[in-house]
Image (tube, helix red, strand yellow):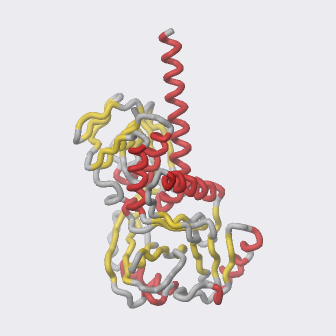
Amino acid sequence: MICVVGGGVMGCTLTYRLAGRGLPVTLVEVGWIGQSGASSVPVALLNPYRGRSARASPFDREALASTWRLVEEVKSLGYETGVTRSGVLRIASSPKQAKTWRKRDTKDDEVRWLEPDAVPSGFHVPFGGFLALQGGWLEPRRWLRALAEAAQQEGATVLEGCDAQRLEAGMVHTSRGTVQASQVVLCSGPSLTLGQGELALTHVAGEVIGLESSAPLPYPLAGAVYGARVGGTFYLGGNHRPADQADASAPTQLQRAGSWFVPSLRDARLESVWHGVRAKTADNLPIVRELRPGLWFAGGLAGRGFLCAAQVAETLAEKLTAQRMLVESSSTILRF
């Protein structure tokens, strides 16, 4: 048995991948899938073109391809995923940035440069921008619920409202009893309380605000701020700070920053404020580490969890499958 602790995007994705390989797996989530923790963010982008340079690393490109494969798998099982493949818009904030980005159109077949008059109305685009053609966005609660239910369909056990309290060799003691497990994977992000080992993680806090919006915006927005429209609400995020620092002005600052890109947001009614804490690494690459035999940690995805989880889970599932096969092979040799 493999026990996955934490039902955010990493935990749900890994549980599905393990179950799909025919491995016995139990997911333990202290709350309810998609309703707490960093993965309960109202909206998330699937965008590999990140940072001021807006470059896409080979890892992020591969991660996006893995995510789309996973989405198609889950859809084929009959689940509504809450994932939209729309492209993602990045708007240049200066002529210099536009000059640099415009060159990508001839070098990257997954990017299309847009002059200001080619961008749909509703966006403020004085210098142009580009469309990441393979990008998209998702509603995390719907996506995580689809993953959890698909994992159960593949044979996994999902325990919600269940607190993992203590580890012993081959056992995870929870608020609802003991889970026998030969392997434990901690996917609990910044709330990591079990296990040992030095994990160089920084905790970063941030908000996503929901603003009333009727503007017809066909693309999600990425960049200094990011967001997407869901129904009559535009969700906008982008500020980050150390987790121990409060900032009551963050919603106002986000709305002001976002209104440069989408002017109709300037006077929009504030409907909601989501607050969360994420765990990140110094190089912004996820950590997958065996802390001690049989105890793994997978996380540190920061704001790239929904982009990278499929790739990380696929790799770790292969590793755990190989380990299980080795143990079974060794047992066979000992028996005979």
Is 85 left or right of 144, judged from the image as shown? right
Q: Quadrant of the N terminus?
A: top left
Residue at (63% x, 71% y) in the render: 53
* Picture quadrant where residue 176 is located: top left
For the view shown, which residue lies furthest in the top direction? 336
Above or below, comparing residue 238 to residue 312 in the picture: below
Q: Say which of 159 and 163 sits in front.
A: 159
The reply to whether residue 202 is visible in this rendering is no
Residue 305 in picture, x, y percent from top left: 48, 57
Residue at (42% x, 89% y) in the render: 266
Residue 269 in picture, x, y percent from top left: 34, 86
Q: Say which of 105 and 92 sits in front.
A: 105
Above or below, comparing residue 70 to residue 264 in the picture: above
Q: Say which of 231 and 330 sits in front.
A: 231
Residue 326 in picture, x, y percent from top left: 53, 25
Residue 291 in picture, x, y percent from top left: 45, 37
The reply to whether residue 314 is visible in this rendering is yes
Above or below, comparing residue 206 to residue 332 in the picture: below
Residue at (36% x, 78% y) in the render: 251
Residue at (58% x, 76% y) in the render: 89
Q: Say which of 308 and 254 sits in front.
A: 308
Is 243 left or right of 98, judged from the image as shown? left
Count of marks, rendered view:
0
Above or below, comparing residue 90 to residue 329 in the picture: below
